[in-house]
């Protein structure tokens, strides 16, 4: 009997010690695809999360408490993401989850987080994550639909109402094509030619020839990702098509100009976040400081160019920390309420203002319309 | 009319790319009856080696030459390390070994090079050439020229040289070939080295058009394989004609039917043709005497 009491007492002390330790830090969890086919998304995301949490802790933490970050690598696999979300909540006892580099992984985390009433900030693009709105799920990247709206807005401004589309059949291209067709009529734009190409195709001149032969096409849009858009741009130049040409945010990187060649890419317009053009943003731009700081810190720490994807993770931490400072307590439901109350928070992707009806919180100003001129980026007027 | 012309020129561009890759299959097939599924990786290596040698400061022609030699060396090593050690295995096992090699080379390229897309400048610039209202890039003509030169070289090699006939003999009957004094191991090494070199040459010529990265090999090899099957596996003339036909089929389908069905139509035509003429357009019927 004595032995039993002793054990209980010991267990009690141990439990007390554990809670005391737990109270001294705020636990945040993340599941991103650091490896695997989506490593180009998850790798900068994980790096950014770790860098930012270190900075916050060095500056004294949140409400005087340090943040303890646990990052798992789901390799872009939905099943693993779900398992890790469960482990984060049940074993690691986190108060919030950031992650889901790809849409599949993000969608797998949602039911787990919703059931446990733990706020979840997703880093994947699809609109399905926040539409319909679920109480505990938020996301930071802008959607394909917004990119379409931004492009159509620019086309309308230049007086183009009849356009041709040539889309990749890869996941990104197919999804964006669908979103663009959905919003086209509302934006007052008619898609009069709709061509496609495979993600590994090496010549798209027949499709472009067909678009060119439709005399009423005033502008051409190419939703796609990877090598396709570069080849389409080169083919466009080869055929000597004079109609204005638009690319998507999927290729908003210096690599695109290099692959397509400055000559072929001349005059191409595309929407992009502020991060890529941190250097040429006007000094009075609201996002200038955030994106310049993040770019400088990331490039100094990791010796590689900053990417939009890392920016999504940066914004997720920013939103979470800002909400925790305002929250009544550090419990899931209170943090959730505080996140939903976020107003005009300037991030790298855009300015976030959440509401019970909007868990993305961005508007079209998050996108800048860029034009490629002489092999470099300029802000389109 | 100018549209039709454009579809034909696009088809010719694609066709020359496919033909050049299909030609790479013929040598190894003729020496050993093995369809080398790592052929696409040789194409990838040719492009990637050139990109990185050029980036390291070598002039482009020298970088290309170096890429072809390095890839040929890898082809020889592949034969020595993987194929020769499994020489007594049936052809199917050897084909599976080539698939394994393809996965291995891709993985290694990912680590040795990187995961980005690359391109280097075209040989004679990017100004399109106008033909009857349609355009073609000068680089496409280089690919066509490359395919024709490789075709002629292979044709002469197999019909006019003793070594070429020795390669054929090795595939027909290895034991008999050995008995008449042919060094069959040397013939295998030679065919892998040359096939790799042809693949690398294809990679060097097509990269300015198709771009390159560690994972371009498999899709290119599949198209090249389809072209080789269409024309008749092992026959250089078949590879050339098969490649051009496949390219034309794809671009005409994309132009006149729908771009979504272009791969499907091309493969349906191949399936129908193979069911009528299983050895391909120019393939030889194998006759077994009992």
Image: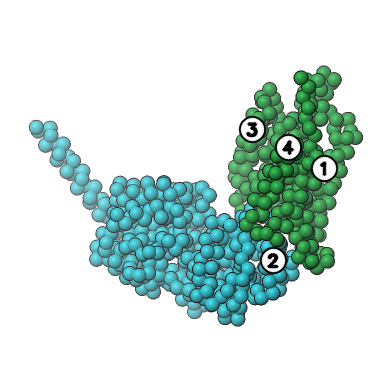
Chain colours: A cyan, B green
Q: Confirm or deny contact between disc 4 and disc 1 (CB under 8 A).
A: no
Q: Give the distance between the C-alpha atoms of the residues marked 3 and 4, in whole angstroms.
A: 25 Å
Label 2 resides on the chain identified as A
From the viewer's side, name the closer residue of B230 and A305: B230
Label 3 resides on the chain identified as B
Task: Describe the element under mark 4 as helix, strand or loop.
Answer: loop
Marks 2, 3 in one chain: no
Q: Which of marks 2 and 1 is in front?
A: 2
Whether residue B285 is visible to the viewer of this picture, yes or no, is yes
Q: Name the residue under label 2.
A: A210
Q: Give the distance between the C-alpha atoms of the residues marked 3 and 1, in whole angstroms.
A: 27 Å
Q: Mark 1 points at which residue?
A: B237
Q: Mark 3 points at which residue?
A: B97
Q: Is residue A195 left or right of residue A78?
A: right
Q: In this view, does A24 lie to the left or right of B12?
A: left
Q: What residue do we see at 15% from left, 39% from top?
A: A8
Q: How crowded is mark 2: few (under 14 residues within 10 Å), some or many (20 or more)?
A: some
Q: In this view, does A29 lie to the left or right of A160?
A: left
Q: Position of residue A170 (x, y in %)?
A: 57, 56
Q: What residue do we see at 59% from left, 77% from top?
A: A161
Marks 3, 1 in one chain: yes
Q: How crowded is mark 1: few (under 14 residues within 10 Å), some or many (20 or more)?
A: many
From the viewer's side, name the closer residue of A60 and A181: A181
Q: Mark 4 points at which residue?
A: B278
């Amino acid at each position: 009997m004595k032995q039993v009491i002793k054990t209980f007492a010991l267990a009690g002390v141990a439990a007390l010690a554990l809670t005391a330790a737990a109270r001294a830090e705020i636990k945040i969890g993340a599941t991103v695809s650091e490896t695997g086919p989506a490593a180009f998304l998850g790798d900068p995301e994980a790096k950014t999360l770790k860098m930012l949490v270190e900075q916050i802790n060095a500056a004294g933490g949140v409400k005087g408490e340090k943040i303890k970050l646990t990052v798992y690598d789901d390799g872009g696999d939905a099943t693993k993401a779900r398992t890790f979300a469960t482990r984060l909540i049940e074993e690691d006892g986190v108060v919030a989850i950031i992650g889901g580099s790809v849409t599949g992984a993000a969608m797998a985390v949602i039911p787990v987080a919703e059931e446990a009433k733990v706020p979840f900030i997703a880093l994947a693009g699809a609109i399905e994550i926040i539409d319909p709105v679920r109480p505990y799920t938020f996301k930071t990247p802008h959607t394909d639909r917004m990119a379409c709206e931004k492009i159509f807005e620019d086309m309308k401004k230049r007086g183009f109402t009849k356009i041709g589309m040539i889309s990749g059949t890869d996941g990104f291209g197919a999804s964006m094509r669908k979103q663009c067709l959905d919003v086209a009529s509302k934006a007052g734009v008619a898609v009069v030619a709709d061509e496609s190409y495979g993600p590994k195709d090496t010549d798209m001149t027949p499709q472009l020839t067909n678009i060119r032969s439709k005399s009423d096409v005033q502008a051409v849009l190419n939703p796609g990702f990877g090598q396709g858009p570069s080849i389409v741009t080169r083919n466009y130049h080869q055929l000597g098509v004079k109609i204005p040409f638009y690319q998507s945010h999927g290729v908003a990187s210096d690599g695109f100009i290099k692959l397509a060649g400055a000559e072929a890419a001349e005059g191409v317009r595309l929407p992009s976040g502020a991060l890529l053009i941190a250097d040429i943003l006007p000094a009075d731009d609201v996002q200038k400081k955030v994106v310049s700081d993040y770019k400088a810190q990331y490039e100094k720490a990791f010796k590689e160019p900053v990417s939009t994807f890392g920016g999504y993770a940066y914004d997720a931490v920013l939103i979470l920390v800002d909400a925790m400072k305002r929250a009544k307590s550090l419990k899931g439901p209170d943090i959730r309420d505080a996140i939903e109350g976020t107003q005009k928070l300037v991030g790298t992707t855009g300015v976030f203002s959440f509401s019970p009806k909007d868990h993305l919180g961005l508007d079209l100003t998050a996108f800048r319309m860029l034009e490629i001129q002489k092999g470099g980026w300029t802000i389109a007027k | 009319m100018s549209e039709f012309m454009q579809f034909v020129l696009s088809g010719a561009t694609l066709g020359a790319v496919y033909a050049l890759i299909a030609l790479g299959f013929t040598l190894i097939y003729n020496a050993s009856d093995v369809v080398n599924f790592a052929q696409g990786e040789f194409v990838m290596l040719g492009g990637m080696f050139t990109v990185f040698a050029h980036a390291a400061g070598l002039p482009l022609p020298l970088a290309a030459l170096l890429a072809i030699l390095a890839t040929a060396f890898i082809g020889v090593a592949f034969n020595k390390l993987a194929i020769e050690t499994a020489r007594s295995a049936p052809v199917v096992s050897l084909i599976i070994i080539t698939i394994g090699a393809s996965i291995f080379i891709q993985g290694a390229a990912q680590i040795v090079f990187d995961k980005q897309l690359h391109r280097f400048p075209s040989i004679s610039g990017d100004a399109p050439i106008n033909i009857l209202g349609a355009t073609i890039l000068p680089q496409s003509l280089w690919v066509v020229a490359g395919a024709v030169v490789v075709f002629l070289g292979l044709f002469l090699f197999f019909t006019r040289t003793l070594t070429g006939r020795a390669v054929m003999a090795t595939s027909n009957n290895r034991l008999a070939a050995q008995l008449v004094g042919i060094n069959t191991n040397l013939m295998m090494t030679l065919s892998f080295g040359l096939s790799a070199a042809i693949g690398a040459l294809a990679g060097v010529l097509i990269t300015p058009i198709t771009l390159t990265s560690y994972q371009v090999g498999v899709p290119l090899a599949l198209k090249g394989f389809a072209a080789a099957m269409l024309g008749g596996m092992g026959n250089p003339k078949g590879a050339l004609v098969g490649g051009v036909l496949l390219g034309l089929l794809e671009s005409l389908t994309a132009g006149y039917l729908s771009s979504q069905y272009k791969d499907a139509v091309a493969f349906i035509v191949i399936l129908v043709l193979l069911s009528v003429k299983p050895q391909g357009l120019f393939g030889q019927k194998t006759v077994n005497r009992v």
